[in-house]
Amino acid sequence: MSAKNIISLVIVMAFTAISCNKKMTETTSVVEEKVDQIMMEKEEAMQISKILYPKTRKDDSVVDDYHGTSIEDPYRWLEDDHSEETIDWVKRQNEVTFGYLHKIPGREDLIDRLTDLWNYPKYSSPFKEGDKYYFFKNDGLQNQSALYSIKQLNDEPTLVLDPNKFSEDGTTSLGGTSFNKNGNLLAYAISEGGSDWRTIKVLDLESGKILPDEINWAKFTGISWAKDGFYYSRYPEPTGDGELSDKNEFHKLYYHKLGTDQSDDQLIYADSEHPQRNVYAGVSEDEEYLFLSATEGTSGNALKVKRIDDKKLKTLYADFDFDFSVIDNNGSTILVLTNHEAPNKRIVAINFDTPEIENWKELIPEQTEPIRSVSTVGNKMFVGYLKDASSSVKVFDMHGKFLSDLELPGIGTVSGISGKKKGTEGFYSFTSFTQPSTIYKLDTETMVSKVFRKSEINFDASDYVTTQEWYTSKDGTKVPMFITHKKGLKLDGTNPTLLYGYGGFNVSLLPSFAITRLPLLENGGVLAVANLRGGGEFGTEWHKSGTLERKQNVFDDFITAAEFLIGKNYTSNEKLAIQGGSNGGLLVGACLNQRPDLFKVGFPAVGVMDMLRYHQFTIGWAWAGDYGRSDDPEAFKYLIEYSPVHNIKPIAYPAVMVTTADHDDRVVPAHSFKYAATLQERHTGDSPVLIRIETSAGHGAGKPTSKRIEEAADIFSFMFYNMGEQFNY
């Protein structure tokens, strides 16, 4: 007799003493169905656990010499993501990964719940251009948000531009917009497949027609109108043969006059002696001045300015050791936000005619909290500060006199206040980990804010709580962490927990709402977001303490955050997952290598995984300010110590799902390819180590809603399944 029949017989016999024959027959049928389901789930689980990874060719002849140290790179061939061999490898990896994911019980239910959560109207803050208000709206499940206009705030909206019609599959997205001063023309940038490359088009808002003007091969650019044209930045057209043009070098600034061909565009600025400098333009609201920012990396810039009609640029600051951001002008006075002699930033006034440093006037001095943003609305400056990694806003007049604090609805994140300098109204949004964006209308004369639009979502935020905990990192530094969960959560060490971090490039992780994380919270999970060194939460020094030879501080902060969560019984190492993207992907990869015993699951997303070669791909050279470069002997010493690809050991790793995209031209997918191949080669345990490669997608921005839902479902299904947890949907 089979095991299934024995189980059925035993259960049937137990019911015999208290049931009639008819009821016994019915019970037997129900029991057999239940046993069938249990046996099928067990069989599926056995199939999932048996993973046969695709074979990845090794080329042991590829060896580089770094200052006398030989480093093997057997998977170098995966750097060519256009080769037939790499394309075939991607296909085989995805077959294994999606074959695994699609068999996880409850995945489809999770997709259904995420779809339900996502299906509510989402709005941006309105902004005024010409005589109309504009805003972006997504009806709920649209792949991209569309642009609408209204004459009065209570009018029925008119569709202006619908990115959902850019492509049939929703992978072509809107990459930026800019209105001319009169508000009758809209320049907009298009991104295909998630790429950072942009095509710029112009829409006549009065006729609704797209003009013949078209700009190609723009990248890392704004669109700044002046008179009858606009400024933009671009690289030379890529050749596809590995020449310098493919390496994102020789960035140039152009001016395009409407009605002319791109080949006739006026070159405004180029630096032929420094190929690895980027240049960006901005125009004052009154269109009197052009501001030019030149960068050598991700922090520090030179600042130049000229009157629009002048030919010669005037230098306000020539070196690259501080950050300078133009706020606006007040006549011939240029208002600048800078960390020059102020790690937490200050606002200075620079006269166009006497721009020397000794003539600078400090309007708003540095304070204990770092400045995050500045907006000029209603002839006032609204200065956003970071107080313990959340928002506060102070209001000043245009000469730097403090007027008041802006009253906020709670602890969370405020977007920059939009509005015109000469207007009397502004708009801003407020959000937190459990509260979707609420849009407020601000009267800049009375300083009274009123709710303009509130999101309606099928999720009760009142059931959840966010606290901020401070823990002590390895070297004694106090580090904050936001922790969100259901009210009344039992601290018994059994809660599935996701720890998220970034820790780099002066980026601040502030309270933010993410639909993708809600199923974790609904199912008794914990979301922890750590504000690691390397970020910008506490100013320039906090950022610098997580860069270059100090990068290990970031990993120590993250590891200590995990230990804190376990020590406080929020979770255990059997219920803890870590996640991070881009620089955060590097973070996760390094921590998985350094403390594989501490985590159950890891999600390194679009990560910088090869720290010896990152600077040789696309825009990677610009990250050297945070990382250092392997062609520097001193930098090589610390890079090789934590580079994720180079520190994978022949041991048992946690369950890992690497995520990347085939069109990522910022952190090229080769990083993730080489990391996954090495991990699959050396991993000695039974936990799955997979790579999920999104097609027709890039570094993250502009990804269609449908792809975002599927990716989130795959991530949390993978996490819960490998923790032995289930979603209760």
Image (cartoon, rainbow, N blue to C red):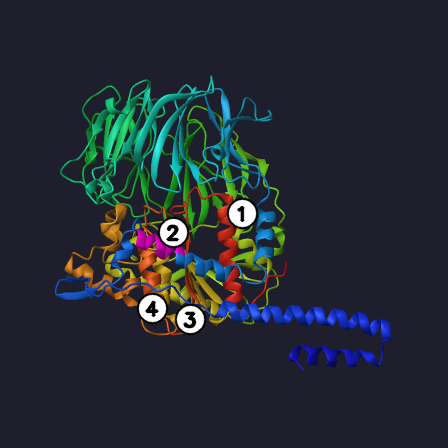
Q: Earlier in the sequence, mark 3 or mark 2?
A: 2
Find residue 588 and report its image quarter. bottom left
638 left or right of 723 in image: left
Quarter of the figure that contains the C terminus: bottom right
Disc 4 to disc 3, how far (Cα)? 21 Å
Label whose residue precedes the other's in the sequence (4 or 3): 3
Q: Is residue 76 above or below residue 153?
A: below
The amino acid beneath tag 2 is Glu
For the residues labelled 1 and 3, the Cα–Cα distance comes to 34 Å
Q: Among all residues in the image, which is located at the extreme right?
A: 20
Image: 305 above or below 686: above
Label 4: which residue?
681
Q: CA distance from mark 1 to mark 4?
A: 49 Å
Please name the residue shown 49% across and 35% down the image: 164
Which of disc 4 and disc 1 is earlier in sequence?
Answer: 1
Among numbered discs 2 and 4, the one appearing first in the sequence: 2
Magenta-drawn stretch contains 245: no
> In the image, what residue type sits under mark 1?
Gly
Q: Answer yes or no: do the residues labelled 1 and 3 have beta carbons within 8 Å?
A: no
Tell me the crowding category of disc 1: few under 14, some 14 to 19, or many 20 or more residues within 10 angstroms, Cα based.
Answer: few
Residue that label 3 marks: 598
